[in-house]
Image: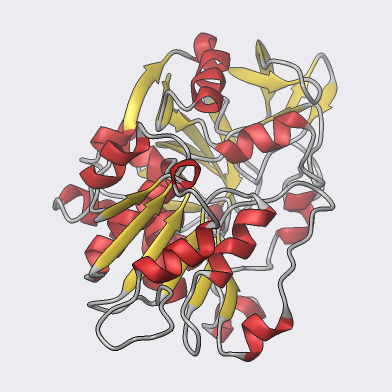
Amino acid sequence: MKTRAAVAVQAGRPLEILDVDLEGPKAGEVMVEIKATGICHTDDFTLSGADPEGLFPAILGHEGAGIVVEVGAGVTSVRPGDHVIPLYTPECRECAACLSRKTNLCTAIRSTQGQGLMPDGTSRFSLDGQKLHHYMGCSTFSNFTVLPEIAVAKINPDAAFDKVCYIGCGVTTGVGAVINTAKVEIGATAIVFGLGGIGLNVIQGLRLAGADMIIGVDLNPAKQAWGERFGMTHFVNPSEVGGELVPYLVNLTKRGNDTFGGADYTFDCTGNTNVMRQALEASHRGWGKSVVIGVAGAGQEISTRPFQLVTGRTWMGTAFGGARGRTDVPKIVDWYMSGKIEIDPMITHLLRLEDINRGFELMRSGESIRSVVVY
Protein backbone atom coordinates (compact mmCIF):
# COMPACT_ATOMS: atom_id res chain seq x y z
CA MET A 1 0.00 0.00 0.00
CA LYS A 2 0.96 3.66 -0.31
CA THR A 3 1.43 5.93 2.70
CA ARG A 4 2.33 9.60 3.00
CA ALA A 5 5.56 10.14 4.91
CA ALA A 6 8.25 12.69 5.75
CA VAL A 7 11.46 11.05 4.55
CA ALA A 8 14.95 11.87 5.84
CA VAL A 9 16.83 11.41 2.59
CA GLN A 10 20.21 12.29 4.07
CA ALA A 11 21.71 13.98 7.12
CA GLY A 12 21.41 17.74 7.35
CA ARG A 13 18.68 18.07 4.74
CA PRO A 14 15.03 19.01 5.35
CA LEU A 15 12.56 16.16 5.33
CA GLU A 16 10.83 15.43 2.04
CA ILE A 17 7.10 14.68 1.91
CA LEU A 18 6.67 11.64 -0.31
CA ASP A 19 4.28 8.79 -1.06
CA VAL A 20 6.14 5.61 -0.09
CA ASP A 21 5.33 1.92 -0.22
CA LEU A 22 4.47 0.06 2.97
CA GLU A 23 4.27 -3.72 3.17
CA GLY A 24 1.66 -5.21 5.48
CA PRO A 25 2.42 -6.78 8.87
CA LYS A 26 4.08 -10.19 9.04
CA ALA A 27 3.76 -12.65 11.92
CA GLY A 28 3.97 -10.91 15.29
CA GLU A 29 3.58 -7.46 13.72
CA VAL A 30 0.95 -4.73 13.74
CA MET A 31 0.03 -2.02 11.23
CA VAL A 32 -0.99 1.27 12.83
CA GLU A 33 -2.60 4.32 11.29
CA ILE A 34 -0.74 7.15 12.99
CA LYS A 35 -3.14 9.96 13.89
CA ALA A 36 -0.66 12.34 15.51
CA THR A 37 3.08 12.51 16.15
CA GLY A 38 5.26 14.82 18.18
CA ILE A 39 8.50 16.34 16.91
CA CYS A 40 11.25 15.54 19.42
CA HIS A 41 14.85 16.73 19.83
CA THR A 42 15.98 13.13 19.29
CA ASP A 43 14.56 13.22 15.77
CA ASP A 44 16.54 16.40 15.12
CA PHE A 45 19.65 14.86 16.70
CA THR A 46 19.48 12.04 14.16
CA LEU A 47 18.60 14.29 11.25
CA SER A 48 21.62 16.49 12.01
CA GLY A 49 24.02 13.57 11.48
CA ALA A 50 25.32 13.63 15.07
CA ASP A 51 23.61 10.34 15.96
CA PRO A 52 26.12 7.48 15.70
CA GLU A 53 23.24 5.10 14.92
CA GLY A 54 21.63 7.41 12.38
CA LEU A 55 20.76 5.70 9.09
CA PHE A 56 19.57 7.20 5.82
CA PRO A 57 17.27 7.22 3.96
CA ALA A 58 14.82 6.74 6.81
CA ILE A 59 11.40 7.66 8.10
CA LEU A 60 11.96 9.33 11.46
CA GLY A 61 9.48 9.93 14.28
CA HIS A 62 9.01 7.99 17.51
CA GLU A 63 6.38 9.90 19.50
CA GLY A 64 3.02 8.92 18.07
CA ALA A 65 -0.48 7.65 18.69
CA GLY A 66 -2.92 5.90 16.40
CA ILE A 67 -5.27 3.03 15.63
CA VAL A 68 -4.44 -0.58 14.83
CA VAL A 69 -5.70 -1.35 11.31
CA GLU A 70 -4.24 -4.80 10.68
CA VAL A 71 -2.40 -7.50 12.63
CA GLY A 72 -0.15 -10.33 11.51
CA ALA A 73 -0.34 -13.99 12.44
CA GLY A 74 -0.02 -14.78 16.13
CA VAL A 75 -0.81 -11.31 17.44
CA THR A 76 -3.05 -11.57 20.50
CA SER A 77 -2.54 -8.44 22.67
CA VAL A 78 -4.11 -5.95 20.23
CA ARG A 79 -6.65 -6.11 17.42
CA PRO A 80 -7.92 -3.78 14.67
CA GLY A 81 -9.64 -0.74 16.17
CA ASP A 82 -7.50 -0.60 19.31
CA HIS A 83 -5.92 2.76 20.12
CA VAL A 84 -2.18 2.46 20.72
CA ILE A 85 1.05 4.32 21.32
CA PRO A 86 4.17 3.01 19.50
CA LEU A 87 7.07 2.14 21.80
CA TYR A 88 10.69 2.82 20.88
CA THR A 89 11.55 0.86 24.02
CA PRO A 90 9.56 -2.37 23.63
CA GLU A 91 8.50 -4.77 26.37
CA CYS A 92 8.62 -8.43 25.40
CA ARG A 93 8.26 -9.69 29.01
CA GLU A 94 10.42 -12.70 28.16
CA CYS A 95 14.06 -11.58 27.69
CA ALA A 96 16.57 -11.54 30.56
CA ALA A 97 16.25 -7.77 30.89
CA CYS A 98 12.46 -7.83 31.17
CA LEU A 99 12.48 -10.76 33.57
CA SER A 100 15.10 -9.13 35.80
CA ARG A 101 12.68 -6.36 36.80
CA LYS A 102 15.82 -4.23 37.19
CA THR A 103 15.61 -2.40 33.86
CA ASN A 104 13.17 -1.41 31.15
CA LEU A 105 15.77 -1.94 28.40
CA CYS A 106 14.20 -4.92 26.65
CA THR A 107 16.73 -6.68 24.42
CA ALA A 108 14.34 -8.77 22.30
CA ILE A 109 14.66 -6.71 19.11
CA ARG A 110 17.53 -4.35 19.98
CA SER A 111 19.95 -5.53 17.30
CA THR A 112 17.60 -5.21 14.33
CA GLN A 113 15.99 -2.03 15.66
CA GLY A 114 19.43 -0.41 15.76
CA GLN A 115 19.87 -1.36 12.11
CA GLY A 116 16.62 0.34 11.12
CA LEU A 117 14.95 -2.99 10.39
CA MET A 118 12.07 -5.15 11.58
CA PRO A 119 12.92 -8.25 13.68
CA ASP A 120 13.21 -10.45 10.58
CA GLY A 121 16.00 -8.22 9.23
CA THR A 122 13.96 -6.51 6.50
CA SER A 123 12.15 -3.17 6.12
CA ARG A 124 8.45 -2.67 5.49
CA PHE A 125 9.09 0.72 3.85
CA SER A 126 10.42 1.34 0.35
CA LEU A 127 10.52 4.07 -2.29
CA ASP A 128 10.85 3.21 -5.98
CA GLY A 129 12.12 -0.20 -4.94
CA GLN A 130 14.78 1.22 -2.60
CA LYS A 131 14.70 0.26 1.08
CA LEU A 132 13.82 2.95 3.59
CA HIS A 133 15.00 2.43 7.17
CA HIS A 134 12.65 2.31 10.13
CA TYR A 135 13.55 4.66 12.98
CA MET A 136 13.70 3.65 16.64
CA GLY A 137 11.34 0.86 15.66
CA CYS A 138 8.52 3.38 15.18
CA SER A 139 8.70 5.69 12.10
CA THR A 140 5.73 7.81 13.15
CA PHE A 141 6.46 10.45 10.50
CA SER A 142 4.44 8.18 8.23
CA ASN A 143 0.63 8.14 8.21
CA PHE A 144 0.81 4.33 8.42
CA THR A 145 3.58 2.26 9.97
CA VAL A 146 4.30 -1.33 10.95
CA LEU A 147 5.66 -2.30 14.37
CA PRO A 148 6.34 -5.46 16.36
CA GLU A 149 3.47 -6.41 18.65
CA ILE A 150 5.77 -5.96 21.66
CA ALA A 151 6.31 -2.33 20.64
CA VAL A 152 2.74 -1.04 20.94
CA ALA A 153 0.89 -0.09 24.12
CA LYS A 154 -2.90 -0.34 24.11
CA ILE A 155 -4.42 2.82 25.62
CA ASN A 156 -7.73 4.37 26.65
CA PRO A 157 -9.73 4.95 23.44
CA ASP A 158 -11.13 8.22 24.80
CA ALA A 159 -7.70 9.88 24.90
CA ALA A 160 -7.00 12.57 22.30
CA PHE A 161 -4.32 11.46 19.84
CA ASP A 162 -2.81 14.93 19.48
CA LYS A 163 -2.15 15.08 23.23
CA VAL A 164 -1.26 11.55 24.30
CA CYS A 165 1.20 11.06 21.44
CA TYR A 166 3.52 13.11 23.67
CA ILE A 167 3.44 10.23 26.17
CA GLY A 168 5.28 8.16 23.55
CA CYS A 169 8.49 9.94 24.57
CA GLY A 170 8.63 13.35 26.28
CA VAL A 171 6.08 12.93 29.06
CA THR A 172 7.11 9.40 29.99
CA THR A 173 10.83 10.21 29.84
CA GLY A 174 10.53 13.24 32.11
CA VAL A 175 7.99 12.00 34.63
CA GLY A 176 9.49 8.50 34.62
CA ALA A 177 12.99 9.79 35.36
CA VAL A 178 11.61 11.17 38.62
CA ILE A 179 9.31 8.31 39.60
CA ASN A 180 11.14 5.23 38.28
CA THR A 181 14.82 6.18 38.06
CA ALA A 182 15.49 8.68 40.84
CA LYS A 183 12.59 7.55 43.03
CA VAL A 184 12.18 11.04 44.46
CA GLU A 185 10.52 11.22 47.87
CA ILE A 186 8.22 13.78 49.48
CA GLY A 187 10.08 16.87 50.68
CA ALA A 188 13.13 16.44 48.43
CA THR A 189 15.10 19.25 46.80
CA ALA A 190 15.78 19.04 43.08
CA ILE A 191 17.44 20.95 40.24
CA VAL A 192 16.38 20.56 36.61
CA PHE A 193 18.86 21.73 33.97
CA GLY A 194 17.09 22.63 30.70
CA LEU A 195 13.41 23.52 30.62
CA GLY A 196 12.38 22.19 27.24
CA GLY A 197 9.82 19.48 26.68
CA ILE A 198 11.67 16.92 28.80
CA GLY A 199 12.63 19.33 31.58
CA LEU A 200 9.07 20.54 32.06
CA ASN A 201 7.90 16.97 32.43
CA VAL A 202 10.64 16.34 34.99
CA ILE A 203 9.27 19.34 36.87
CA GLN A 204 5.72 18.05 36.85
CA GLY A 205 7.05 14.65 37.87
CA LEU A 206 8.76 16.30 40.84
CA ARG A 207 5.55 18.06 41.75
CA LEU A 208 3.72 14.75 41.51
CA ALA A 209 6.31 13.11 43.78
CA GLY A 210 5.97 15.86 46.39
CA ALA A 211 9.37 17.53 46.04
CA ASP A 212 9.67 20.65 48.19
CA MET A 213 12.19 22.83 46.33
CA ILE A 214 12.21 22.53 42.53
CA ILE A 215 14.84 24.68 40.85
CA GLY A 216 14.81 25.16 37.09
CA VAL A 217 17.97 26.24 35.25
CA ASP A 218 17.79 27.66 31.72
CA LEU A 219 19.43 30.42 29.68
CA ASN A 220 16.10 31.41 28.15
CA PRO A 221 14.22 33.78 30.51
CA ALA A 222 10.95 32.90 28.78
CA LYS A 223 11.21 29.43 30.32
CA GLN A 224 10.62 30.81 33.82
CA ALA A 225 6.89 31.19 33.29
CA TRP A 226 6.72 27.71 31.75
CA GLY A 227 8.56 26.15 34.67
CA GLU A 228 6.34 27.87 37.22
CA ARG A 229 3.30 26.68 35.29
CA PHE A 230 4.27 23.07 36.02
CA GLY A 231 5.51 23.36 39.60
CA MET A 232 8.97 25.00 39.61
CA THR A 233 9.61 26.98 42.80
CA HIS A 234 12.88 28.77 41.84
CA PHE A 235 14.36 29.84 38.49
CA VAL A 236 18.06 30.37 37.78
CA ASN A 237 19.43 31.89 34.58
CA PRO A 238 23.17 31.03 34.51
CA SER A 239 23.95 34.23 32.60
CA GLU A 240 22.61 36.27 35.53
CA VAL A 241 24.41 34.45 38.34
CA GLY A 242 27.52 36.62 38.14
CA GLY A 243 29.92 33.79 38.99
CA GLU A 244 30.26 30.03 38.95
CA LEU A 245 26.90 28.27 38.64
CA VAL A 246 27.57 25.21 40.82
CA PRO A 247 28.53 27.10 44.02
CA TYR A 248 25.53 29.34 43.51
CA LEU A 249 23.18 26.37 43.30
CA VAL A 250 24.82 24.59 46.21
CA ASN A 251 24.34 27.67 48.37
CA LEU A 252 20.75 28.09 47.21
CA THR A 253 19.87 24.59 48.36
CA LYS A 254 21.30 24.88 51.89
CA ARG A 255 18.62 24.33 54.50
CA GLY A 256 18.65 24.49 58.29
CA ASN A 257 21.98 23.38 59.76
CA ASP A 258 23.17 21.85 56.47
CA THR A 259 26.67 23.23 55.89
CA PHE A 260 27.25 21.48 52.56
CA GLY A 261 24.23 22.25 50.39
CA GLY A 262 23.42 20.69 47.06
CA ALA A 263 20.20 19.14 45.81
CA ASP A 264 18.99 15.69 46.72
CA TYR A 265 18.33 15.10 43.02
CA THR A 266 19.50 16.81 39.84
CA PHE A 267 18.46 16.13 36.24
CA ASP A 268 20.27 17.01 33.03
CA CYS A 269 17.82 17.54 30.16
CA THR A 270 20.23 19.35 27.83
CA GLY A 271 22.52 16.73 26.28
CA ASN A 272 25.44 19.07 27.04
CA THR A 273 28.30 17.19 28.70
CA ASN A 274 29.50 20.28 30.59
CA VAL A 275 26.02 20.70 32.04
CA MET A 276 25.97 17.02 32.99
CA ARG A 277 29.05 17.64 35.11
CA GLN A 278 27.50 20.72 36.69
CA ALA A 279 24.39 18.71 37.52
CA LEU A 280 26.42 16.04 39.29
CA GLU A 281 28.49 18.54 41.24
CA ALA A 282 25.39 20.48 42.28
CA SER A 283 23.97 17.35 43.94
CA HIS A 284 24.39 16.85 47.68
CA ARG A 285 27.50 15.36 49.22
CA GLY A 286 26.79 11.94 50.71
CA TRP A 287 23.53 11.11 48.97
CA GLY A 288 22.92 13.26 45.90
CA LYS A 289 21.65 11.52 42.76
CA SER A 290 22.19 13.08 39.35
CA VAL A 291 20.22 11.68 36.42
CA VAL A 292 21.41 12.07 32.83
CA ILE A 293 18.46 12.28 30.43
CA GLY A 294 19.84 14.36 27.57
CA VAL A 295 21.65 12.59 24.71
CA ALA A 296 25.10 13.89 23.75
CA GLY A 297 26.64 13.80 20.29
CA ALA A 298 28.80 10.99 18.96
CA GLY A 299 32.19 10.75 20.62
CA GLN A 300 31.41 13.12 23.49
CA GLU A 301 32.33 12.03 27.01
CA ILE A 302 31.46 13.11 30.54
CA SER A 303 34.05 13.71 33.24
CA THR A 304 34.36 14.81 36.85
CA ARG A 305 36.85 14.46 39.67
CA PRO A 306 36.62 11.04 41.36
CA PHE A 307 36.23 12.95 44.63
CA GLN A 308 32.69 13.87 43.58
CA LEU A 309 31.71 10.20 43.48
CA VAL A 310 33.83 9.00 46.39
CA THR A 311 32.00 11.47 48.61
CA GLY A 312 28.69 9.78 47.96
CA ARG A 313 27.15 11.25 44.84
CA THR A 314 25.59 8.88 42.30
CA TRP A 315 25.60 9.45 38.54
CA MET A 316 22.65 7.75 36.87
CA GLY A 317 21.22 7.46 33.39
CA THR A 318 17.70 6.80 32.20
CA ALA A 319 16.04 5.80 28.94
CA PHE A 320 12.31 6.30 28.39
CA GLY A 321 12.13 7.28 32.05
CA GLY A 322 12.69 3.70 33.15
CA ALA A 323 9.15 2.90 32.00
CA ARG A 324 8.07 -0.55 30.85
CA GLY A 325 6.16 0.42 27.77
CA ARG A 326 3.20 -1.92 27.51
CA THR A 327 2.72 -1.91 31.29
CA ASP A 328 3.35 1.73 32.24
CA VAL A 329 2.32 3.82 29.22
CA PRO A 330 -1.40 2.96 29.56
CA LYS A 331 -1.19 4.02 33.21
CA ILE A 332 0.38 7.36 32.28
CA VAL A 333 -2.40 7.93 29.74
CA ASP A 334 -4.86 7.29 32.56
CA TRP A 335 -2.99 9.79 34.76
CA TYR A 336 -3.51 12.37 32.03
CA MET A 337 -7.17 11.50 31.61
CA SER A 338 -7.77 11.87 35.37
CA GLY A 339 -5.92 15.21 35.59
CA LYS A 340 -2.99 13.86 37.57
CA ILE A 341 -0.55 15.21 34.96
CA GLU A 342 -0.91 17.94 32.34
CA ILE A 343 -0.11 17.76 28.65
CA ASP A 344 -2.36 20.22 26.80
CA PRO A 345 -0.39 23.42 27.59
CA MET A 346 2.82 21.84 26.28
CA ILE A 347 1.34 21.17 22.83
CA THR A 348 2.09 24.65 21.53
CA HIS A 349 1.75 24.04 17.78
CA LEU A 350 -0.42 21.73 15.65
CA LEU A 351 0.86 21.21 12.11
CA ARG A 352 0.09 19.33 8.92
CA LEU A 353 2.62 16.78 7.69
CA GLU A 354 3.52 19.17 4.87
CA ASP A 355 4.66 21.70 7.50
CA ILE A 356 6.80 19.31 9.52
CA ASN A 357 10.06 21.12 8.74
CA ARG A 358 8.60 24.26 10.30
CA GLY A 359 8.03 22.22 13.45
CA PHE A 360 11.76 21.47 13.57
CA GLU A 361 12.52 25.18 13.16
CA LEU A 362 10.16 26.09 16.00
CA MET A 363 11.88 23.53 18.24
CA ARG A 364 15.40 24.70 17.39
CA SER A 365 14.51 28.34 18.05
CA GLY A 366 12.87 27.53 21.38
CA GLU A 367 9.51 28.89 20.22
CA SER A 368 7.71 25.61 20.82
CA ILE A 369 7.55 23.21 23.72
CA ARG A 370 6.09 20.49 21.51
CA SER A 371 4.88 20.71 17.94
CA VAL A 372 2.54 17.92 16.91
CA VAL A 373 1.77 16.79 13.38
CA VAL A 374 -1.85 15.74 12.93
CA TYR A 375 -2.66 13.46 9.99
- Please tell me whether residue 79 is drawn above or below residue 211 in the rendered image: above
Residue 248 on image: x %, y %? 45, 62
Q: Is residue 256 left or right of residue 358?
A: left
Q: Is residue 225 left or right of residue 137?
A: left
Residue 336 on image: x %, y %? 23, 50
- Please tell me whether residue 123 is drawn above or below residue 97 in the rendered image: above
Residue 320 on image: x %, y %? 52, 58
Quadrant position of the N terminus in the picture: top right
Count of numbered labels shown in the rendering? 0
Residue 322 in view in this figure: yes
Compare residues 218 and 337 and report the one nearer the observer: 218
Residue 177 in view in this figure: no
Residue at position x 48%, y 80% from top?
288
Q: Is residue 115 left or right of residue 359?
A: right
Residue at position x 57%, y 25% from top?
142
Residue at position x 44%, y 61% from top?
326
Give the farthest residue toward the left. Answer: 338
Snapshot quadrant of residue 273: bottom right
Snapshot quadrant of residue 85: top left
Compare residues 170 and 366 and report the one nearer the observer: 366
Residue at position x 32%, y 35% from top?
346
Q: How is the image coloured?
A: secondary structure
Compare residues 59 and 362 and report the one nearer the observer: 362
